[in-house]
Amino acid sequence: MWNIKKIKKTFNILGLYNEFNAKYFGNKLGECKFEDSADPCDYIPAVAAIEYRNRRNGAKAATITFNSMVDWDERSIRQVLLHELIHFYVFTRLGFCPCFQHGLFFIINMLRINIMHNEHVRMFWHGEKITWSKDRPC
């Protein structure tokens, strides 16, 4: 099972965030925190989720929660983090985000990153390239 400390230490998640923010989003993304699904018995239907906030000063912030039941590797962390950061970028640019939808602005930015930077961000995983942990305690 993966917790956020293990994810941060193994994959330098903050370093990836800073790299992606500069390279793909022009440093326009605000503060971003990272968590794991604290209780492995909690049902998180996705490999990750994002929650947005508007700060009092107008700045945008987000928290990305990684599913602790995924057997994370470098490729999956990279793809999933970029996917969630595209959602954050949509929220930052539009001031709102149809959070559970992958609308036109999301798709345009996903394709921009994939084509111009040879990344492999996907809209959905459905478990085909994500390995789920076999030691689920529930």
Image (tube, rainbow, N blue to C red):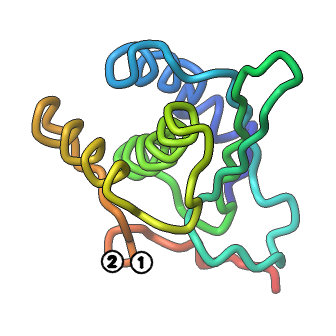
Vertical comparison of 114 with 98: above or below: above
Residue 77 % position (x, y): 46, 46
Residue drawn at the location 68% of the way across and 54% of the way down:
2
Residue drawn at the location 29% of the way across and 42% of the way down:
109
Work out how far the residue at label 1 is from the one at label 2, CA to CA, in angstroms. Answer: 4 Å
* Front-most of residues 130 and 83: 83
How many neighbours does mark 2 have within 10 angstroms: few (below 14), some (14-19), or many (20 or more)? few
Residue drawn at the location 86% of the way across and 58% of the way down:
38
Residue 58 % position (x, y): 76, 21
Badges 1 and 2: C-beta atoms under 8 Å apart? Answer: yes
Residue 103 % position (x, y): 38, 61
Look at the numbered disc 1 and give the secondary structure of its residue. loop
Residue 127 is labelled as: 1
Q: Residue type at mark 2?
A: Glu
Q: Residue type at mark 1?
A: Gly
Q: Where is the C terminus found, in terms of image quarters? A: bottom right
How many neighbours does mark 1 have within 10 angstroms: few (below 14), some (14-19), or many (20 or more)? few
Residue 96 % position (x, y): 61, 46
